[in-house]
Image: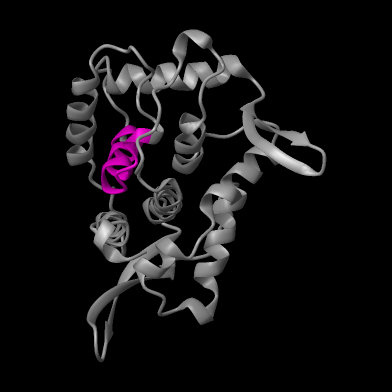
Amino acid sequence: MTRHQTLAERLLLLSIPTTDPKKKRTPFSNQPGNLDFTLQAALLVELVQSGHVAVVPSRGVLVGETFTLQQSGYRPTGSAPLDALLARVANPRNARKTLQNWLIGGDATRLVKADLVERGILAEHYDTFGPFVRNYRAVPVEPAAHAALRDDFEDVFLRDREPAQSDNAIAALLVSGDAWEHVEPVEGTPGMAHFFERLRDLSDRYRPESSPGQDARGVTRVLAALARVNAPSSGH
């Protein structure tokens, strides 16, 4: 990879089971958190955190104060999914679109995965039976690099290595989206209870970096919107 991994890329790659038989992942529960919500929020967080987009209040006549997104000057990010989302924010037709609608209106999993395939980081495999696709898998092209990403994640969340700001953001996204089951440690890993404690601790540490003219609480509002939209009682 010629550039740093985005938050959404890291989350998606961590959600893919490793091919190492010694690191078999535990099965998901019947109601795992919605990964697509979490990846869409990760794209928004990255744009807000980098200063490409600001979260601004928008007061409606009937619903009171809500929040929407505002372009802060178009500069390409180098990431196709991020640039696609940035172009949508810049579209005047989306000027009053609420955070909730930004979160549920994307196709983040497909876009991020397609970009990783295009860049040769993932390969797609289809098992077919006649004209039917029986099974689809996205497989890391470089298993060693994928394993290193997993080891790096577990160094922070199981072995208490000092986190980077991006690790705190990952924790906040996983907690807000209730999506930890997509990236939980491998089966048999000791310290699962510690993993949950660590996840919440790092989530609480996450504070967005502010920049001139940008609401320092903007990313926090994005995460709060994710939690409301993804709640079981929301009907989505």
Q: Residue furthest right?
A: 130
Q: Residue 33, located in which quarter of the rendered image?
A: top left
Q: What residue is shown at x 82% (from left), y 39% (from top)?
A: 130
Rendered position, 230 above or below 131: below
Question: What's drawn in magenta, residue-wise?
Answer: 166-181
Q: In the displayed structure, does residue 107 sit left or right of residue 167?
A: right
Q: Measuring from the top left, give residue 137's x and y in whole percent.
A: 63, 33
Q: Measuring from the top left, give residue 115's x and y in whole percent.
A: 64, 44
Indicate left or right for 132 with 135 as reference: right
Q: Nearer the viewer, residue 169 or 48?
A: 169
The quarter of the picture where residue 131 lies is top right
Residue 180 is one of the magenta-drawn residues = yes
Taking the magenta stretch, the answer to whether it contains residue 168 is: yes
Q: Residue 195: give x, y in percent of width and height.
A: 24, 24
Q: Is residue 192 shown above or below 22?
A: below
Q: What color scheme is it?
A: one colour
Name, please, the residue furthest toward the front. Answer: 130
For image coordinates 27% across by 75% down, the residue present is 66
Vertical placement of 152 versus 46: above or below? above
Question: Which is nearer the eye, 168 or 13?
Answer: 13
Is residue 121 shown left or right of residue 211?
right
Q: Nearer the viewer, residue 54 or 154?
A: 154
For image coordinates 40% across by 27% down, the residue present is: 27
Quarter of the image containing the C terminus?
Answer: bottom left
User: The N terminus is located in which quarter?
Assistant: top right
Name the residue furthest top.
Answer: 22
- Nearer the observer, 190 or 152: 190
Magenta region, mostly helix, strand or loop? helix
